[in-house]
Amino acid sequence: MDYGHSDTTTAAPVTSPPGIEHHPLPLSVKIVIAGGFGAGKTTLVGAVSEITPLSTEERLTQASIGVDNTDGVQHKDGTTVALDFGRITIRDDLVLYLFGTPGQSRFWFVWDDLALGALGAVVLADTRRLADCFPSVDYFERRDLPFLVAVNCFDGAQRYQPDEVRHALDLEPDVPVVLCDARDRQSAKLVLVRLLENLIRTRSGQRR
Amino acid sequence: MPFPPTHEPADWAEADSGRVVRPYAITAGRHTPDSGSEFHLTTQVSSVAARRSTPRTATPEQIKIVHLCQDRPLSVSEISAYIDLPINIVQILLSELLAEDLIVIRSPDLHHDVPIATLEAVLNGLRAL
């Protein structure tokens, strides 16, 4: 095994003492799953994750949150924000994590952590409350993080055509809009497949 | 920098969102990890095989982490979820474990695009689901 050498396919150095045996460490990548409250983020993550979605907490310092922090859980030490996430082991040396954005969009500090280094994002749109995904769309546009919009088709909700959603959200033409059922593994998988296809297409089309 | 107050045994009985010991008591008052910039949400952690017998000075939380990561690598987020401690606290504990050579880590490169080959590998893996 090569310790302390960069993996040439990923350029990520492995921090380890020379000569010490350990399990080889995979490269990790992540995709952000965003959308309004109740849009189906955790449902979609759960549909494709190999583990039941887990929940972790990020603690915010007073400096990183505004005065109105009633949406986080208050502790004496500060406010913590919960994040739901799942994982998909792609290969022995490659793991994909899916992180749901916090329930309220005001925790931009946490959004920045999620978006940094992410492959891209999925914005789940709930047609019953389409405006709820405006903040997500705005955020990823401003950060220039590639994303697509997945319209979660709830039972009984009015069916929209992708073009109608595109128009309502005022999306750039290069942002894919797909329909999905976040509860369905194959449907959720296709959302992620579509995102990756678009990332590759965009990257291949760039001239350097 | 002020020292945190010591914790009397009575504090253990205090209700605090389900956690008996206040998080900063777990980290002996430290608030920032030494190499915190390496412990991202998806940084991979594995225990070092030769060091599975943890030193006597290891805290219960440190021992938990070493055991958790001995069979397969886990991300910082997964460790945080499984041992039910906030990411911030876990980052401090991991930096201590790393300094003791009890774990090895692999951090993602968050500032550069992954190679297209990696995107294609992810795509193929997703298609195979």
Image (spheres, rainbow, N blue to C red):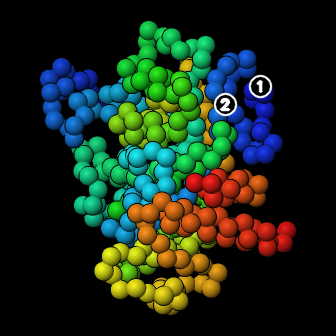
Residue of label 1: A1
Q: Chain of mark 2?
A: A
Q: Considering the numbered disc 1 on the image, is that residue within a helix, a strand or a loop?
A: loop
A181 over A58 or under it: above or below: below
Q: Chain of mark 1?
A: A
Q: Considering the numbered disc 2 on the image, is that residue within a helix, a strand or a loop?
A: loop
Please rate how many residues cluster around mark 1, counting C-alpha atoms within 10 Å: few if below 14, some from 14 to 19, many from 20: few
Q: Are marks 1 and 2 in contact (CB under 8 Å)?
A: yes
Farthest right residue? A208
Residue placed at 39% from the left, 19% from the top? B59
A91 or A19: nearer the viewer: A91
Same chain for mark 1 and mark 2? The answer is: yes
Identify the mark at residue A24; answer none if there is no mark.
2
* Image location of residue A115, percent across then percent down: 54, 60
Residue placed at 64% from the left, 81% from the top? A174
CA gap between label 1 and label 2 equals: 9 Å
Q: Is residue B3 left or right of residue A172?
A: left
Q: Is residue B65 left or right of residue A205?
A: left
Q: Is residue B112 left or right of residue B107?
A: right
* Image location of residue B105, percent across then percent down: 61, 33
Please rate how many residues cluster around mark 2, counting C-alpha atoms within 10 Å: few if below 14, some from 14 to 19, many from 20: some
Return the disc, 1 or 2, that comes first in the chain's sequence: 1
* Image location of residue B118, percent across then percent down: 72, 53
Disc 2 residue type (three-letter) = Pro
Q: Is residue B107 left or right of residue A181?
A: right
B55 or A39: nearer the viewer: A39
Q: Quadrant of residue B61?
A: top left
Disc 1 residue type (three-letter) = Met
A197 or A29: nearer the viewer: A197
